[in-house]
Amino acid sequence: MKRTIMIIAALAICIGAGAQTIGKAELKEIQESFTKDASTKALQNILTSNSNIKSLAQNYEVKGKVDHFFKYRVDVKGITDQKQSGRCWMFTSMNVLRPAVMKKFNLRNFDFSHSYCFFWDQFEKANLFLENVIATADRGMTDRDVEFFFKSPVADGGVWNLFYDVAEKYGVVPAEAMPETEHSNNTSQMRGMLNEYLRGCGWNLRQAIAGGAKAAEVRKQKVEALKGVYRILALCMGEPPVEFTWRYKDANGTVKSITTTPMEFYKGIRPEEYNPENFVMIMNDPTREYYKVYEIASYRNTYEGVNWVYLNLPNEEIKPAALASIKDNNPLYVSCDVGKQSNTAAGVGVLDVNNYDYATLLGVKFDMDKKARILTRQSGSSHAMTLIGCDTDENDVPVKWEFENSWGVKSGNNGYLTFTDKWFDEYLFRIVIERKYLSPKALKAAKTKPVEVPAWDYMF
């Protein structure tokens, strides 16, 4: 009896004094609110026979109102295609470097081997996962960190610092030196196999440690696990070259050839200032204090690499810096919530907060601001692209911007996307920029000690 009373009391606390079930009176009120007048019946007929709500919500009033002309635009050539993979961060990082490579070798076209860097990214992520498993082996499987590590041992997503980490360790190569394969273009099956294999390896490591295995034995077991990772990657994508010969034709039609290593090639094309000492990852996150530095724990791919560290700034600080970089002909790595209010159809390529009027179509309010959307998981950074253009008004104030995307030339405006300044405010999150473009206030804030944020934080 006492136990029953305690359970009832606990339930009462959980439910709360003001909570109630849906009764007949409430249900009747809710049902009667759906008034089937002529317009509602028409909408119901349309929506029950057409599953594409997005197309039905297109806002005719803004259709065709955004052009693709820009006062300032970085000199870029060629559109890449990441295919069915989450490697946008890698493509974008390389797209930022491509113009300098084309200039150095006097090329009309050029692309890096994304397969090469992806191989080492996955390999290093596997090692980091195993190291995290070893470090948390004394915790239960329901520990928040342990759960996070085992949920996705390796993923193909990432941010700029991951490209920097893997390029600094393994270098880069031209596309011809390690071509794409079915499994670099479409990563899901290979990653599924890797994750299943790594979860088993992680479990076995935990069991060995729990059974009293010595450190040397644990390390040996980890190396054996990595041999399996290397085998899966090599079978699906081929082995990365340790040296290669690259033949190319320059813009003058002259055929040339160089024999080098991935690291030598990387050092030869990497700008001198290209490092975290000169570049800062900026975030616009209204859920956290601005002019503060944050570091995401274990958000890297190489164990010894640079974590994702960012400076949180208001858009009023970010936009002038981005515009200054574009004016200097320097493209920028950025990431955003590309799926929101975006029309990426071929021949269109416009991102505008008024593209789709869901509220009028469905007769309900969608009124969350950026902060609320982040905290409720409705919005977050989902895709990286290269920021290359800005159009301004008569006072040189931005009105719209341009992305170079990595979805091929058949997407958007021949591979490019134009987005309004208001869309920038609502859905752009990250940008990597040289320190020289930041204000004194931002530079001072960038020098402060980072606040550590867990890798499973709502924003990441």
Image (cartoon, grey):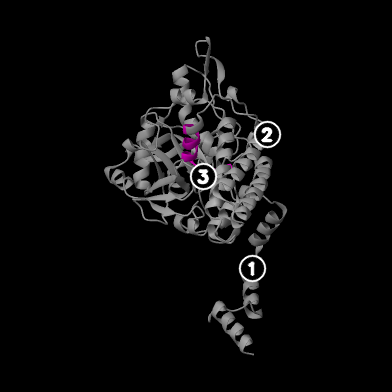
Q: Secondary structure at mark 1?
A: loop
Which residues lie in the magenta part? 156-168
Q: Position of residue 278 (x, y in %)?
A: 35, 36
Decide: few, some or many residues near mark 2? Use Cα within 10 Å; few <14, some 14-19, many ≥20.
some
- Residue flagged by tag 2: what amino acid is it? Cys
For residue 178, which quarter of the picture?
top right
Residue at point 70% right, 51% down?
50
Q: Which mark is residue 439?
A: none
Secondary structure character of the magenta stretch overall: helix
Residue at point 67% right, 58% down?
42
**162 or 26, which is in the foreground?**
162
For the residues labelled 1 and 2, say whether their Cβ atoms are less than 8 Å apart. no
Task: From the viewer's perspective, tell me whether residue 165 is left or right of residue 120.
Answer: left
Q: Which residue is mark 3?
A: 62
Given the current orientation, which residue lies at the most extreme bottom position? 1
Q: Position of residue 177 (x, y in %)?
A: 58, 23
Decide: few, some or many residues near mark 1? Use Cα within 10 Å; few <14, some 14-19, many ≥20.
few
Compared to 247, does 49 lie above or below?
below
Magenta stretch holds residue 184: no
As measured in the structure, the alpha-carbon distance from the residue carrying label 1 to the one carrying label 2 is: 57 Å
Q: Which residue is mark 2?
A: 236
- Residue flagged by tag 1: what amino acid is it? Thr
Q: Which residue is mark 1?
A: 35
**68 or 272, which is in the foreground?**
272
For residue 271, which quarter of the picture?
top left
For the residues labelled 3 and 2, say whether their Cβ atoms are less than 8 Å apart. no
- Residue flagged by tag 3: what amino acid is it? Val
Q: Position of residue 122 (x, y in %)?
A: 58, 39
Which quadrant, please, contains the N terminus? bottom right
Is residue 53 among what the camera can see? no
Task: From the viewer's perspective, tell me whether residue 347 is left or right of residue 232.
Answer: left
Is residue 288 among what the camera can see? yes
